[in-house]
Amino acid sequence: MAAVDTNSAKVSLPAIAHALIAAGRLDSKSAEALYRKSQTGKNGFLAELTSSGLVGASDLAHTVSAAYSVPLLDLAAVDPQRLPKGLLDPKLCNAYRVIPLAKKSNRLIVATADPSDQEAAEKIKFATQLGIEWVIAEYDKLMKLVEAAGTSAAESIDNIVGNDFDFDESSLEEADTDSAEEAVSEVDDAPVVKFLHKMLVDAFNMRASDLHFEPYEFTYRVRFRIDGELREIATPPIAIKEKLASRIKVISRLDISEKRVPQDGRMKLKVAPNRIIDFRVSTLPTLFGEKIVIRILDPSSAKVGIDALGYEADEKARLLRAIERPYGMILVTGPTGSGKTVSLYTCLNLLNKPGVNISTAEDPSEINLPGVNQVNVNEKAGLTFAAALKSFLRQDPDIIMVGEIRDLETADIAIKAAQTGHLVLSTLHTNDAPTTLTRMRNMGIAPFNIASSVILITAQRLARRLCPICKTPADIPDEALRDAGFGDEDLDGSWIPYKAVGCSACNNGYKGRVGIYQVMPISEELQRIILKDGSALEIAEQAKREGVRSLRQSGLLKVRLGLTTLDEVLSVTNE
């Protein structure tokens, strides 16, 4: 120790340096050099020590813990969101490189890398009027936690948004009521506005269909649904959840004071001088705040044309023949998010001519179609699908579109309209075309009404489309292909399956989506089976004899054409 005292007389080393020298972790000469450097620079002694590589953060923590008999804690096991708030000023934490971990009675447990710092101890005692219990932490992990704790919500959002993101706030259309303007002044926080705008623009540019803003107990996350798959995009500070929800509600013309029940609204965003995108907003109260889902309603998606939807030539011909008929019912079926609305709008665009009167009842109408009389149902006000349909029949319609057949009353009116000279288009949530007929029977519709009104049913799914740039041949055994549904005649070597790889131009090997369809016209033989109250299996067998492909067979055809992968088809279709 005499050598240490002699050296330390030259330079007044901190106590922790003496502890490291005594433990043999550091020599006096190096300690002096590091200390002098810390006195002239911005970094402290421990920062210079760990960055020099002479003593690692882990070795430093273990040495100090043993030297001062203070317990050691791995901060990697600590959830930053669960740390107590407001016990210590973030500036104080940053100045002395400490972080409060818990309060027990009249004592504060504080993580530090240097328990010998008496000045820090006195400052914390004075600020909190509590006793101090030190816990040793690794310096690098401690500094990350200190930095995170000292970052405000606004700074965190700015870090996500970036300095190079500029926006015109007027591009988001505001509510035009006095109350809404008052609400804006209460909740308008520049970083929150900027963050929301960036999320909307990014979602549009990334071809997302939906944005999910999800609050949890200690975290908040934003996810986009891109090509049918949810991807986590950002984790903003949880402190913004109320302001973000209020901001979205204001521009969607929703009640910002109502947080107990779900609400639905719309907003617009100008993404180019002549390009405005609509967003459908849905709020849902959860345990830890309101989850908000925003669906992007791009009007251009309704004008892509039938060729872009992915129908095979025979399927397209069947659909076109059906919509050219003067009366009858056409049903589009599939789960939520399978593209039913786009298919219906595409058909309406083909039918929309000056000499035709078209009326639609939707919940809500997603895309504005010029020349089409669109009605939003409002069940609270008594404007149900059934009520809208009754009114349509007094409005001299030629073509009627019903957003969804949900009950017997709506189905009954729609069928009567189809039987009395009107073309009716609608949707149902069923698994495939044959089960649609049994679903209608289960709703209470008489078989003879189904047989005499329904002229075509289309079941559909959306599968992710392979990226044409990076897709590569896949080595799939013939046995696996047979199990998927390929016949021996299909495995003739004239085609090869592909697999997803991933590149800078796509999303994990996929870019966009492709439709998989089962287009089933109701033939005379199928009408006979329906009148005999036949099962979905009998209907499916007859449809197969008439050349109607199942969803699985249509998906396998897309695999043969190299448009998607076998795994993707197996995930969205049943045999």
Image (cartoon, helix red, strand yellow):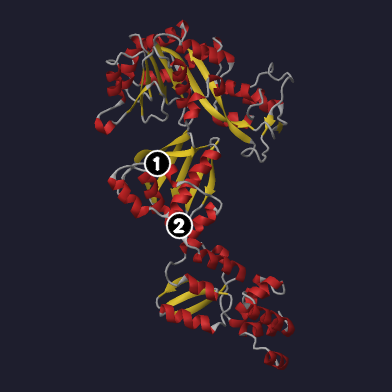
Report whether 312 appears left or right of 170.
right
User: 249 above or below 143?
Assistant: above
Task: Confirm or deny contact between disc 2 and disc 1 (CB under 8 A).
Answer: no
Placement of the C terminus among the 4 image quadrants: top right
Residue ranking furthest to the top = 524
**What residue type is disc 1 on?**
Glu
At x 65%, y 71%, the residue is: 57
Describe the element under mark 1 as helix, strand or loop: loop
Question: What separation in Å lies between label 2 and label 1 (alpha carbons)?
Answer: 32 Å
Residue 454 x, y percent position in the rendering: 41, 13
Asked which quadrant contains residue 546, the reply is top right
At x 58%, y 21%, the residue is: 554
Residue ranking furthest to the front = 273
**Which numbered disc covers residue 479?**
none
At x 32%, y 29%, the residue is: 377
At x 56%, y 78%, the residue is: 70
**What residue type is disc 2 on?**
Phe
Name the residue tied to disc 1: 173
Asked which quadrant contains residue 64, the reply is bottom right
Q: Can residue 256 be seen in the rendering of this structure?
A: no
For marks 2 and 1 on the same chain, the one whose residue lies earlier in the sequence: 1
User: 331 above or below 364?
Assistant: above
